[in-house]
């Protein structure tokens, strides 16, 4: 059993992906045949959450990932946070099925810039 969105493998008996909450397919070939598009990549957590909310509201299945980009040493982070605006340490990614890409694009308000989602420092 395989998830067609995140491509994770499951043991027999499972019918739904625990991360993507969608039905599994029987073979790895079936899962590989399903096209997945990267909808968004960025480092703004508020925008990431806003997009996820829009996809949930529209009922569009998605896969989201949060990856640590860098971890500054403790003594460097004290300096950075005090004297400089720190660089983002996380990267966020959202994937959707290719067949849902147009609906996903429409679900996300185009007038929303990263600033419209708020600044993470607030």
Image (tube, grey):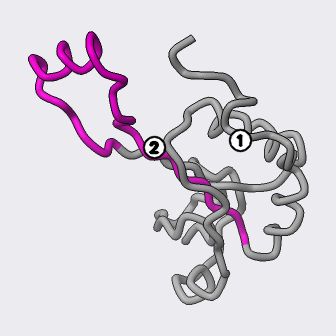
The residue sitting at 52% across, 70% down in the picture is: 7
User: Closer to the camera, 39 or 32?
Assistant: 39
Distance from Cα at disc 2 to Cα at disc 1: 12 Å
Image check: 60 left or right of 41?
Answer: right
- As drawn, the label of residue 66 is 2
Please tell me whether residue 29 is drawn above or below residue 49 in the rendered image: below
What residue is shown with label 1? 52
Q: Residues within 10 Å of mark 1 (few under 14, many from 20)?
A: some
Residue 5 in percent (x, y) is at 62, 67
User: Closer to the camera, 106 or 21?
Assistant: 106
Residue 16 in percent (x, y) is at 65, 56
Task: Please identify the quadrant where the C terminus is shown.
Answer: top right
Q: How many marks?
A: 2
Image check: 20 left or right of 93?
Answer: right
Image check: 114 left or right of 110?
Answer: left
Residue 17 in percent (x, y) is at 60, 55
User: Of label 2 and label 1, which has the lower sequence position?
Assistant: 1
Q: Residues within 10 Å of mark 2 (few under 14, many from 20)?
A: some
The residue sitting at 75% across, 56% down in the picture is: 61
Residue 108 in percent (x, y) is at 83, 48
Q: Is residue 77 magenta?
A: yes
- As drawn, the label of residue 36 is none
- Quarter of the view holding residue 95: bottom right
Q: Which segment is the magenta one?
A: 68-97
Query: Mark 1 falls on what kind of element?
Result: helix
Query: Mark 2 falls on what kind of element?
Result: strand
Labels 2 and 1 touching (C-beta < 8 A): no
Task: Please identify the quadrant where the N terminus is shown.
Answer: bottom right
User: Closer to the camera, 78 or 6?
Assistant: 78
The residue sitting at 82% across, 68% down in the picture is: 100
- Quarter of the view holding residue 3: bottom right
Please tell me whether residue 7 is drawn above or below residue 45 in the rendered image: below
């Amino acid at each position: 059993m395989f998830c067609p969105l995140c491509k994770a493998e499951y043991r027999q008996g499972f019918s739904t992906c625990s991360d993507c909450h969608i039905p599994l397919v029987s073979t790895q070939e079936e899962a590989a045949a399903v096209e997945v598009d990267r909808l968004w990549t960025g480092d703004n957590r508020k925008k990431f959450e806003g997009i996820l909310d829009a996809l949930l509201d529209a009922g569009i299945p998605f896969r989201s990932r949060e990856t640590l980009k860098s971890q500054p040493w403790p003594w460097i982070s004290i300096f950075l946070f005090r004297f400089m605006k720190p660089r983002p340490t996380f990267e966020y990614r959202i994937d959707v099925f290719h067949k849902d890409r147009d609906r996903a694009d429409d679900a996300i308000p185009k007038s929303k810039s990263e600033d419209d989602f708020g600044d993470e420092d607030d």
